[in-house]
Amino acid sequence: MVILGLNYFFHDSSACIVENGQLKSAIEEERLNRDKHTREFPKLSAQRCLKDAGLSFEDVDYIAVSIKPKHNWFNKVIYVLSYLLGLLKSKNLMRFVGHHVGHTYLMQRNFWAWYNENWGKSNKKPKVYFIEHHLTHVAGSFFISPYKSAALLGIDGSGEWATTWIGHGKDNQITKISENFFPHSLGSFYEAVTQFCGFKPNYDEGKTMGLAPMGNPDTYLDEVNKIISVDSKGRFELDLSYFNFQYLATKRYSDKFEEIFGPARKPDEKFTQRHQDVAAAFQRVLENKVLEICDILYEQTKEDYLVIAGGVSLNSVMNGRIVRESKFKDVYVMPAAGDNGTALGAAYYVYNGILNNPRNFVHDNPYLGTSYTNEEIKAVLDGAKLKYEYVEDICDKAAELLQHGKIIGWFQGKMEVGPRALGSRSILANPAFPDMKDKINAEVKFREAYRPFAPSAIVEAKDDFFDLKVEAPFMLKVCNVLEQKQSVIPAVTHVDGSARLQTVRKELHPRYYEVIEKLGSKTGVPVVLNTSFNIQGEPVVESPKDAIRCFWSTGLDALVIGNYVLSK
């Protein structure tokens, strides 16, 4: 049984292949078309997933799509009627209609045109399931989690109309407890402050999370607390007078927002303490309110474990607090917990939820994308007439470069799925050098100086450096660096003493584990600085050509690609 999963309606288009319950391949469209967070239909990723799985379009039995276009359509009609009653501004009605009706029609037309292109003349046509968006987030994540039963929480900007989904999963059964609906959205709440801080909303929320520790949350905490209230069922309500996003306006915060928090920062302006304090307050309130919801969810389910999904679940600072402060023992956040992962969620909702097949897969391996052999890499290097060195013990060579303070592009094995670089398409450096963070931000990533970098540590060294009781293989749980170790790994210790840790197991990525282990043997510190192999505004590199281009256009010192090393 072959299921092709697709996400194309919102953003971060993606595809995956599930064969007899096993996840064979998963790729974001942006890695192939080079348009970050692309909304384009995932033609390239669908083709590449099939190729990598050794399959063709004729082998597909089912197609699972992470959107149910007519779901909550009644709520949308009510929203239009509210305009007719004078509750919505007329200039924004067409924006609403264009977004929710026109976009739905366009994307459905694109899907069926693609479907007919590939199966129109075929005798065997795959059955298509359109799955409710939040079910692809939370139920899909639960079905591939390590838990037989768990509390479920989905939080994002919005799906078809829902913004939060709370429920319970046991075996193949999913039970909904409550939902929130647009415009009451924690994702939109955070997008508004992201835009206020001068960043691109629904794109740069990670920058806001990184900015928050620079500020004092207490300065505006009382004001931000007034904006959100949570009821006894875990539903929340926003004071919409602070926002414009409910009108689908370009500016997502209202004049009242600026009256209280001051003028917004323009993208090219310097950061003021005020903007940092506002970011800190919104981050803290997001964490606090989600912890409130988690407490209610625990009381409703009495489960030991939580599965969380949706774009807001990429807020790793929030996840770290859930691990430390909630009643749940641990949290499962899949590596592609945003919309890119809904292709997987849709496929597994069909496989386990609709077709009721036994659960036989745990998504603990994010290395599901494309890979290139040494022969393929060499052909590209030779074609570009580049000088390189073949090294048999490539991990020892990389560790030696890192030991001496070199910044390297690291291109090895199958590409990761999800927004975090996890040791296949990474930029690596030695975290012991105090100036390394500033150097990489300025000379390699070309991004804001305050932004932190993450550590990757072999799992055996976790407790020696970090205050985290559970593992974090997908780099989605922020923890504290032990106080006595903060001066040992300053380049990956944020201003508040925290770090977004990735724990690395040998069996999951042997080559990445080995380079960290060998750096530890040389320096006593089995930890590397790990950031995504790209420059700001571009997707993570996918191919050898992408890696070479990024290497020669940045301040990287060396490129370690397969068993080949290029140096400047």
Image (cartoon, grey):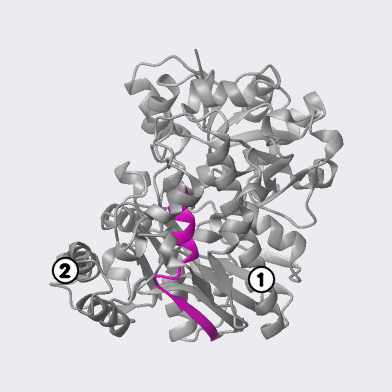
Horizontally, is 232 left or right of 552 in the view?
right
Residue 274: image quadrant is top right
User: Where residue 417 sits: x, y (%)?
Assistant: 48, 52
Farthest left residue in view:
121
| Kind of residue at disc 2 | Arg
**Of discs 1 and 2, which sits in the foreground?**
1
Farthest front residue in view:
259
Residue stretch rendered in magenta on the structure: 176-193
User: Where residue 519 sits: x, y (%)?
Assistant: 73, 28
Counting labels gives 2
Secondary element under disc 1, as helix, strand or loop, is helix
- At x 70% / y 22%, what residue is drawn? 434
Q: Which residue is mark 1?
A: 292
Residue 155 is labelled as: none
- At x 13% / y 72%, what residue is drawn? 121
Residue 407 is covered by the magenta coloring = no
Horizontally, is 151 left or right of 417 in the view?
right
Query: Can residue 296 be seen at all in this image of the molecule?
Result: yes
Q: Which residue is mark 2?
A: 109
Q: Is residue 387 above or below residue 431?
A: above
**Of the residues under marks 1 and 2, which one precedes in the sequence?**
2
Residue 380: image quadrant is top left
Residue 181 is covered by the magenta coloring = yes
Query: Can residue 474 be seen at all in this image of the molecule?
Result: no
Seen from the viewer's position, the closer of residues 67 and 320 is: 320
Seen from the viewer's position, the closer of residues 433 and 318 is: 318
User: Where residue 438 sits: x, y (%)?
Assistant: 59, 23
- At x 46% / y 38%, what residue is drawn? 373
Q: Decide: few, some or many residues near mark 1? Use Cα within 10 Å; few <14, some 14-19, many ≥20.
A: some
